[in-house]
Amino acid sequence: MLQMTIQQALAKMDAGEISAVALTRAYLDQIERLEPQIRAYITLTPESALEQAQAADDLRTQGVTSQQKPLLGIPLAIKDVLSTAGVETTCASKILKGYVPPFDATCVARLKEAGMVMLGKLNMDEFAMGSSTENSGFFPTHNPWDLERVPGGSSGGSAAAVAALMCMGALGTDTGGSIRLPGAFCGIAALKPSYGRVSRYGLIAYGSSLDGAGPMTRTVEDAARIFAVMAGHDPLDSTSMPDAVPDYVGALTGDIRGLRVGVPKEYFVDGIRPEVEQTVRAALNQLEALGAELVEISLPHTQYSLPVYYMVATSEASSNLARFDGIRFGTPVAGEDMWDTFRKTRGQGFGAEVKRRIMLGTYALSAGYYDAYYGKATQVRALIKRDFESAFADVDVIAAPTATSVAFKIGQKMDDPLEMYLADVLTIAPNLAGICGISVPCGFSSENLPIGLQLIGPSMGEATILKAAHAYEQATEWHQRIAPIAADS
């Protein structure tokens, strides 16, 4: 039951062959079995999940089907940076321990309206700042393919839960690669939408001009089904785009003949593990065999993506995280007076990486340095965006590795922030440009660790990258492999 796709599960529930309650119990049992080793969940909601599943079964007895509610009875889980009404939302930070939002994030509300069963809230790097989920204020998450390795970050709990069959799909968020990198490290399909395609209302902000929520699933079709529910304009988010939502599932025709695939030379440089490059190039050959045309392109400002990102993102974080003082929400630490309470609350509530990024951003925004750092970064960001616009005048999608390596060992990079930041070097540029990207598994290393292929599309080009990713997925068997720890489920 756990290895079914969303479409298979919907068909069986609509036909009365299985119930939403039985499906939900199967996932709760899997969580009980594997959670002590994986540590993917911060908060579990088994009672309300079973109530939601029973409600889905009741609706079906009244004649409601997945045609009316496209996720009716599907057990999903939510990254803990997305607000959930009545369920604790911590951003994996001690400073928000005990915070229970009175409202749902728009993307969560839309999944609920579509019939989702919510299993719980997933672990992450604190305030989405990290590439390994080791920066969680509570505990690290372990990669289901190798428990000694990281699942990637910041949506590591989401990726690990999907890969370990501890939910049918999950929501993650991506500021500089936080959906795609864990997707690659855990061997699942992971979609980062274009900026403005999915509402950010209720997404607790890290970098407001970069953040976005997206689906993480075992197949591209499952991702398309969840994404179709999430996408669309939201009057509660002024950055939400008014564009109509295409038929993402209908776009998965499997036919990519004539598709022009750009291969950027800047994404195949020194520092990429040879095994990763060989595997991704084999995937490019597979796309060509399916009828796509490979075109070598250049994105000349790629080398500036990392420093630009860490100027823009940390500056926005400095501003966004100023509100967390333990007074209006969260957990205060008592001091001698108001200012001492602020200092102690933020000093003890935030972890080391969050404090590091707040200080970097505050410095970059300070008087006398704003033009030299943040101002200059925004100018170079415009050049990076222009690179992509020029490339998409000649190609339909861009293909590259998702990461330069496979999942690394837990603790391996924690003492070297720069080395950790480099983990996102191939995923940052699409966030700076506001465009979309997806990671799909394209092979395995000699240690049996997943390797990801990244497909990048223009703004609002999700239908095209989903189509290309699905065609590749259907021509290969990598997505069918199950992590050993979950294989006997």
Image (tube, helix red, strand yellow):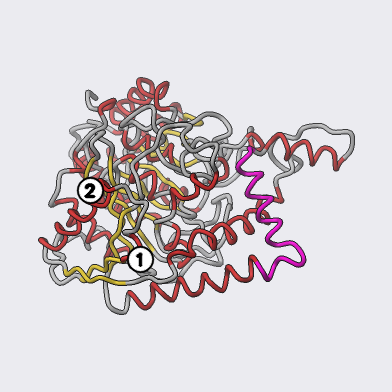
**Between residues 215 and 50, which one lies in front from this camera angle?**
215
Q: Residues within 10 Å of mark 2 (few under 14, many from 20)?
A: many
Q: Tell me residue 214's x, y (percent).
A: 40, 52
Range drawn in magenta: 351-372
Q: Quadrant of residue 454?
A: bottom left
Q: Tell me residue 140's x, y (percent).
A: 49, 31
| Quadrant that contains the N terminus | top left
**Between residues 343 and 227, which one lies in front from this camera angle?**
343
Residue 385, placed above or below residue 446: below
Q: Is residue 218 left or right of residue 311?
A: left
In the picture, the disc for residue 442 is 2
Q: Is residue 330 left or right of residue 3?
A: right
Q: Is residue 251 left or right of residue 356?
A: left
Please give the residue where the numbered disc 1 appears in the rendered image. Answer: 245
Q: Residue furthest front?
A: 270
Q: Are marks 2 and 1 in contact (CB under 8 Å)?
A: no
User: At 35% across and 66% down in the image, what residue appears?
Assistant: 245
Three-letter amino acid code of the residue under disc 2: Cys
Q: Is residue 144 left or right of residue 91?
A: left
- The main secondary structure of the magenta stretch is helix
Q: Nearer the viewer, mark 2 or mark 1?
A: 2
Q: Tell me residue 151's x, y (percent).
A: 40, 37
Q: Tell me residue 67's x, y (percent).
A: 26, 52
Q: Secondary structure at mark 2?
A: strand
- Count of numbered circles on the image: 2
Residue 482, placed above or below residue 6: above
**Between residues 142 and 166, which one lies in front from this camera angle?**
142
Q: Secondary structure at mark 1?
A: loop
